[in-house]
Image: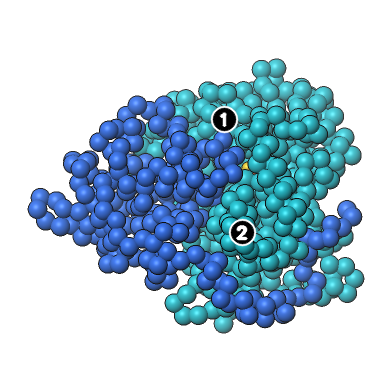
């Protein structure tokens, strides 16, 4: 996964709540067995059926930061939702509440999910709707989102746990980190209860 | 220190714990299906890794499988390629697979319990959000993404943060015709789709204790629709009775040792929950959803809500969008909504008890001539059991379609889909836009409401049919 330190880009306001992963990418696109190339499925139903859907508007076509309403990424565990957002050019999603699995998936794939209070989200919406060329900077080092408004810099601090932040800053792969603890895993395995089930071999019904 | 059930299971699986880092948790059972695994196996191959514990891993085909002609190759080439990729991966990495046509095939969350692989006190994961279903046995079971699937395949562990604890207590007696599905829809309507976020929910109380395992699975299944990481219920005699004699359940002296341990899996007196919700079972009625997320539900006696009455701006916009998509007018009684299709199945309500409840309502009757009803057992095992009981004939004689096992119209990755504008009453778990087919409109209901609706062609509670004959089904 690529490291994430800081990102500056324009932002698209997605004024919707409860954006579930079926909307981010519908099931028919999940039949593919690759890990990239999902941009055609990103929000496809809204892009097709709603001419003025925010991502259809030219002023937001190049946005790399998505500012969404609460409960973003609910529903299915499909990591394809994260891949589709990244394939569609997004590096950051900002919301006041994310579904757990979506947020977890994003940290594994290198998409930064930033949790801001709803009041900050509303303020960002207002700013980027008033001027879609507003440059927004998301700084993971400093843990803050900034943009300029009338000559002043507006600072919005955010929280993220130190471990996840470190992993994202370094671009580290979890499996490699866990493999350093192989001895602990083996020690644990030796203590497991002997009657715990095994899938192999298959037993007669 | 007193602990909750979820904390006990969590603590028993910590491989390594260090300040400032997530805990490393051991995973007792990893379930795999064709949709969320191909990229994970590719990742293993690219890094030259193997599957650490094939003996704790079980795969099946469910999302893409057609429910007709299941012994023929899948017609859709993309679906077929995905299923074939799973078969190649299972063979290459030495994983047990229950493919189409196998007696153990079925929806991944139906076959785990059916085989006895799902047991109390275990940690269970799957690249599927409804893994919470297995919590009905007192297991800590949760859905993961594809990167995590790869991590579990490679290491049999997952880095985890300790979840917060929530108690949902349902006390009292469920009224006749009110089932587990109605309980969980009411819980979600009350706490919202984000209400359980960051929490594990323990369902407890006298109404929960009286439920069968099937009904408990229905409740835990939809924990994710309340935003929770997992849902679970303390194991008891009902749990042990369900498990005894299943292929992978412990036997002989092992069984006794297991039960002794399982009996310790209860929340201690004085354990602290971060949040508690109480529900009076007697106040519940059959619930249906009117909108496009599972929190947008109401008792069937209610009417389509008026967004103008919703104070919060975001919620109002959400409701307006939902009603436009659903083609509904505020004030319309829910009972007047006509459906085209009834879907009985899914990992929420595709088990034998669900089929029995629906069959009882349909026995000797015929469904509405303008309504199609699809009955899709959750697994080959459920299908065989239902056929042994003659339920398939009850359904077909009533005019319903009796199909092969799989996810089917729960998400329409196979040919079972709604057409644009078609409306369903569905026993599945998600009423998201387009979930059951592009432009399809979904109302989530219990199996009993599904059957009653099939008879009239309109959203109908079983009590609307024959009040005198109904008893509490517990499903
Ligand atoms: S039945 Fe539906 S919810 Fe359950 S695993 Fe299949 S697609 Fe997912």
- Residue A50 visible? The answer is yes
Q: Chain of mark 1?
A: B
Q: Secondary structure at mark 1?
A: loop
Q: Residue at x 36, y 51 (%)?
A: A91
Q: Quick check: marks 1 and 2 in contact, CB under 8 Å?
A: no
| Residue B368 placement (x, y as % from top left) | 69, 20
Pointer 2 chain? B
- N-terminal of the pair, mark 1 or mark 2, is 2
* Residue behind mark 2: B44
Location of the N terminus of chain B by quadrant is bottom right
The answer to whether B360 appears left or right of A143 in the picture is: right
To which residue does mark 1 refer? B437
Residue pictured at 29% horizontal, 32% vertical: A57
Eyeballing the image, is B116 above or below B358? Answer: below
| Visual hue assigned to chain B | cyan
Where's residue B256, x and y in %? 84, 73
Which numbered tag is attached to residue B142? none
Specify few, some or many for label 2: CA neighbours under 10 Å numbering under 14, 14-19, or 20 or more.
Answer: some
The residue located at (70%, 76%) in the rendering is A189
* B161 or A166, nearer to the observer: A166
> In this rendering, is residue A60 above or below B330?
below
Colour in which chain A is shown? Answer: blue
Instruction: Tell me which image quadrant ligand 1 sits in.
Output: top right
Q: Residue at x 37, y 66 (%)?
A: A169
């Amino acid at each position: 996964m690529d490291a994430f330190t800081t990102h500056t880009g324009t932002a698209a306001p997605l004024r919707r709540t409860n954006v579930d992963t079926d909307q981010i990418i519908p099931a028919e696109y999940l039949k593919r067995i690759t890990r990239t190339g999902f941009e055609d499925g990103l929000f496809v139903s809204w892009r097709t059926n709603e001419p003025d859907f925010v991502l259809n508007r030219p002023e937001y076509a190049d946005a790399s930061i998505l500012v969404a309403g609460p409960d973003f990424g609910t529903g299915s565990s499909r990591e394809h939702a994260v891949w589709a957002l990244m394939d569609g050019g997004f590096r950051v999603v900002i919301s006041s509440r994310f579904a757990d699995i979506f947020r977890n998936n994003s940290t594994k794939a290198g998409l930064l999910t930033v949790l801001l209070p709803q009041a900050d989200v509303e303020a960002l919406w207002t700013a980027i709707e008033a001027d879609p060329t507003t440059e927004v900077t998301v700084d993971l080092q400093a843990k803050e989102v900034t943009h300029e408004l009338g000559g002043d810099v507006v600072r919005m601090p955010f929280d993220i746990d130190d471990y996840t932040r470190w992993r994202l800053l370094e671009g580290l792969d979890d499996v490699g980190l866990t493999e350093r603890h192989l001895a602990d895993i083996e020690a644990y395995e030796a203590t497991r209860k002997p009657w715990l089930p095994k899938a192999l071999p298959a037993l007669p019904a | 220190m007193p602990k909750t059930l979820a904390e006990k299971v969590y603590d028993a699986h910590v491989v390594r714990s260090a300040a400032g880092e997530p805990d490393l948790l051991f995973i007792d059972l990893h379930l795999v299906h064709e949709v969320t695994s191909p990229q994970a196996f590719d990742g293993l191959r690219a890094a030259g890794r193997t599957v650490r514990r094939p003996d704790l891993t079980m795969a099946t085909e469910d999302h893409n499988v057609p429910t007709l002609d299941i012994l023929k190759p899948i017609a859709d080439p993309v679906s077929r390629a995905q299923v074939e990729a799973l078969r190649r991966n299972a063979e290459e990495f030495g994983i047990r697979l229950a493919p189409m046509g196998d007696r153990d095939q079925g929806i991944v969350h139906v076959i785990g319990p059916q085989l006895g692989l799902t047991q109390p006190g275990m940690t269970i994961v799957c690249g599927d959000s409804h893994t919470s279903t297995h919590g009905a046995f007192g297991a800590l079971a949760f859905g993961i993404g594809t990167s995590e699937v790869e991590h579990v395949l490679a290491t049999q562990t997952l880095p985890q943060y300790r979840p917060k604890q929530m108690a949902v207590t349902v006390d009292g007696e469920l009224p006749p015709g009110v089932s587990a599905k109605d309980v969980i829809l009411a819980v979600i309507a009350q706490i919202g789709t984000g209400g359980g976020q960051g929490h594990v929910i323990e369902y407890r109380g006298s109404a929960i204790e009286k439920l069968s395992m099937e009904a408990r699975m229905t409740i835990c299944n939809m924990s994710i629709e309340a935003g929770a990481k997992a849902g679970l219920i303390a194991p008891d005699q009902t749990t042990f009775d369900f498990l005894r004699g299943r292929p992978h359940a412990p036997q002989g002296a092992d069984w006794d040792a297991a039960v002794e341990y399982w009996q310790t899996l209860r929340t201690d007196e004085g354990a602290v929950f971060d949040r508690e919700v109480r529900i009076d079972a007697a106040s519940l009625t059959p619930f249906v959803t009117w909108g496009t997320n599972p929190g947008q539900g109401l008792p069937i006696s209610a009417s389509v809500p008026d967004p103008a009455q919703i104070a919060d701006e975001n919620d109002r916009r959400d409701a307006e969008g939902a009603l436009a998509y659903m083609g509904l007018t505020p004030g319309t009684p829910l009972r007047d909504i006509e459906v085209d299709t009834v879907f009985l199945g899914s990992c929420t309500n595709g088990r034998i008890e669900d089929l029995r409840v629906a069959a009882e309502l349909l026995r000797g009757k015929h469904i509405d001539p303008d309504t199609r009803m699809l009955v899709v057992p959750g697994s080959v095992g459920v299908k065989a059991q239902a056929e042994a009981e003659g339920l398939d004939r009850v359904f077909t004689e009533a005019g319903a379609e009796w199909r092969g096992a799989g996810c089917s119209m729960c998400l329409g990755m196979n040919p079972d889909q709604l057409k644009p504008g078609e409306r369903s009453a569905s026993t599945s778990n998600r009423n998201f836009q387009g979930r059951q087919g592009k432009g399809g409109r979904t109302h989530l209901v219990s199996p009993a409401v599904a059957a009653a609706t099939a008879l009239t062609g309109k959203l109908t509670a079983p009590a609307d049919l024959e009040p005198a004959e109904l008893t509490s089904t517990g499903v």
